[in-house]
Image (cartoon, rainbow, N blue to C red):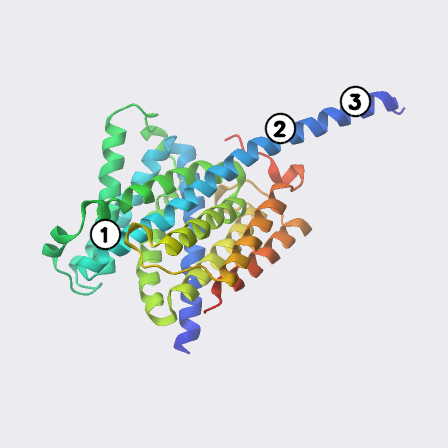
Amino acid sequence: MSVLLAFLGGGSAGMVMGCGLAFNARLQQFLRSPLAVTLTNFSMVFFILALLLGLGALGPFNPGLFLRSPWWAFLGGLAGSTYVTISTIVVMKIGVASSVIAIISGQIFTSVIIDQFGLLGASHHPVHVWRLLGIFFLFVAVVINQFSSKEQVKIAEK
Amino acid sequence: MTASPFLRSKNEHRFSLDVKLMRLKYARYVVLAIVGGSLLPVQLALNTRLATTVHSTSAAATVSYGVGSLALLLLLSTRRFEKPDLKRARRAPWWSFLAGCGGAWYIVSSIYYAAVLGVTLTTSLVISGQVLIGFILDHFGWLGVTKRPFNARRLLVLMFMVLAIVCLGVQR
């Protein structure tokens, strides 16, 4: 039962993220600044997480330990904010499904490279045939999607 | 009255050129989306690195989002970018501000579910959820996105996505 709940929960997290893309795209139509949209998004996540952390809902942590991590480990937020800015621009133009498929392809491809070579402090996980096959299918999906009908590939000029 | 065959073929030619141009524009955004997606594992790897020293994934995520917010604030304050239209933003629907709640929900739940189901299965589930909601939102044009109806080609794309997700979810 708890595994079933976990399945639903994991799937729902993805659905919430997909909706988040559309929320950002909608906000962009009014705010007209992808950076400001990303800031709205990021500061909200920051405050919610900081609140939960402060309330102790996310387990204990020792702030002093942050001094021991290398400076570049703090830069994850820069990659994340660049991603959100790009996705806000892209979703408006090509739609949610196509954006999600392209984003996932980039995500999986890079994660395999990071794992393969153990980059950025990640542990070394050599690629296996199933992951390569998965990447191949992702690639096919992106290509088929690219050659969709005129109606599908219309660029929304909003 | 019927149009002359010559005129029709000329129009059809123009039509296909338009579609080609549209596809080219479309491809540009697809490439941009792939680049955007490739930043996600970079963020994940850096956060994981931070989390190993701090012994708390959620504290690392909090700091990561704090750093991101600060960087965006700095960039916006340089005024080199398009000025946000705050007057218009007041007319934005209230729910469009809530993407951050989704982000927080995703982070907290993915930490929790990764512990229960493992990272690979969690990732597969999250990706499935994203693809599913993507097709649904596009089909109905919900949340203000442009309507892009589900059709046979999209079904084929969906099938390949399912295949990909299954392959990526295989444990060694």
User: Residue, x 32% and y 66% (percent of image)?
Assistant: B112
Q: Nearer the viewer, residue B116 or B149?
A: B116
Amino acid marked by disc 1: Thr
Earlier-in-chain disc, 3 versus 2: 3
- What whole-number distance in Å separates the C-alpha atoms at marks 3 and 1? 59 Å
Question: For the residue labelled by badge 3, is the local secondary structure a helix, a strand or a loop?
Answer: helix
Where is residue B25 shown, x and y percent of the image? 56, 31
Amino acid marked by disc 3: Lys
Q: How many marks?
A: 3
Looking at the image, residue B124 sits to the left or right of residue B23; the answer is: left
Dot 3 and dot 1 residues touching (CB under 8 Å): no
Residue B126, numbered label: none
Looking at the image, residue B89 sits to the left or right of residue B172; the answer is: left
The residue under label 3 is B10
- Circle 2 packing at 10 Å, graded few (<14), some (14-19), many (20+), is few
- What whole-number distance in Å separates the C-alpha atoms at marks 3 and 2? 17 Å
Residue B155 visible in the picture: yes
Residue A24 lies in what quarter of the image? Answer: top left
* Chain holding disc 1: B
Looking at the image, residue A67 sits to the left or right of residue A151; the answer is: left
Amino acid marked by disc 2: Leu
User: Residue, x 46% and y 37% (percent of image)?
Assistant: B32
* Residues at discs 3 and 2 both on one chain: yes
Earlier-in-chain disc, 2 versus 1: 2
- Circle 1 packing at 10 Å, graded few (<14), some (14-19), many (20+), is many
The residue furthest left is A64
User: Residue, x 21% and y 49% (percent of image)?
Assistant: B63
The residue under label 1 is B62
The residue under label 2 is B21
* Chain holding disc 2: B
